[in-house]
Image (spheres, rainbow, N blue to C red):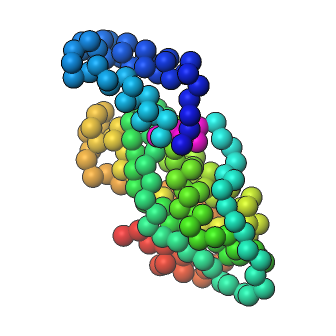
Amino acid sequence: MKTFSDDNFETLKAGTRDLLAAIGDDPARDGLLETPDRVAKAYAEIFASTGQTHFDNYKLFPTDQDTDMVVVSGIPFYSMCEHHLLPFKGRVSVGYVPDGEIIGLSKIPRLVDWAARRPSVQENLTALISSELERITHPKGVAVLVEAEHMCMEMRGINQPGTITRTSLYKGSLKTDALLRQEFSLRGSLK
Ligand SMILES: Nc1nc2c(ncn2[C@@H]2O[C@H](COP(=O)(O)OP(=O)(O)OP(=O)(O)O)[C@@H](O)[C@H]2O)c(=O)[nH]1
Ligand SMILES: [Zn+2]
């Protein structure tokens, strides 16, 4: 988890008090007294990876086996849309075609979680997962599929609960090889 500096923690608390006052509530009422502290702590979790460009919590293993493709599907994530600072949440499927190196399987959901814990948009989240997996494993191909519900589309604005946004990014052999892509669509399907 991220630890904010004392200064930033206090700034978050003061900002939360200001926000509560600005929306017309009373930050001094009993129910809200501890809220600024809780919000600052929650933000430390929700935004834990903000500003980090490289995922470094991984293990690689050499392999001389030929593997067509590794797919981890249905990985849950929570992120915050950078336009409204409201949550978007959903699931990710990640596939890659190894080239002499494989990554520890649990590190793929860890990578997704790391990528999500910052203000973002779904397209950039999709791209970050893909580019970091590429940087780390130097695979022959990568595919990332993200399916999400955006609270900024559900609880405000257009007010459309249940709307699902799907984004995908295919690289290398997973972009050029139609059969491999089709195989990923089947094995990585989020439906
Ligand atoms: N492409 C993309 N857009 C997003 C994402 N999350 C939120 N948005 C959109 O960002 C846009 C911001 O548009 P603006 O017109 O500046 O903001 P707004 O007036 O609050 O827009 P409405 O949501 O349409 O009321 C909206 O269309 C949101 O739906 C995302 O992950 N990807
Ligand atoms: Zn939004």
Question: Is residue 73 depicted above or below 120 in this figure?
Answer: below
Residue 187 on image: x %, y % = 49, 78
The part of the image, by quadrant, that contains residue 189 is: bottom left
Residue at 47% from the left image edge and 21% from the top image edge: 12
> In the rendered image, which quarter contains the N terminus?
top right
- Taking depth in this image into account, of 97 and 29 the one nearest to the observer is 29
Question: Is residue 128 depicted above or below 133 in this figure?
Answer: above
Residue at 73% from the left image edge and 87% from the top image edge: 65
149 lies left or right of 124: left
142 lies left or right of 11: right
Residue 135 on image: x %, y % = 74, 58
- Segment colored magenta: 46-50
- Number of numbered labels in the structure image: 0
Residue at the limit of the structure toward the left, as seen here: 30
- Taking depth in this image into account, of 24 and 28 the one nearest to the observer is 28
96 lies left or right of 40: right
Residue at the limit of the structure toward the bottom, as seen here: 65
The part of the image, by quadrant, that contains residue 3 is: top right
Q: Is residue 49 magenta?
A: yes
- Taking depth in this image into account, of 129 and 184 the one nearest to the observer is 129
Task: Let me know if residue 122 appears in the view.
Answer: yes
Q: Is residue 111 magenta?
A: no
> In the rendered image, which quarter contains the C terminus?
bottom left
Residue 79 on image: x %, y % = 46, 45
The secondary structure that most of the magenta stretch takes on is loop
Task: Let me know if residue 172 appears in the view.
Answer: no
- Taking depth in this image into account, of 43 and 5 the one nearest to the observer is 5
Residue 100 on image: x %, y % = 78, 78
Residue at 49% from the left image edge and 18% from the top image edge: 10
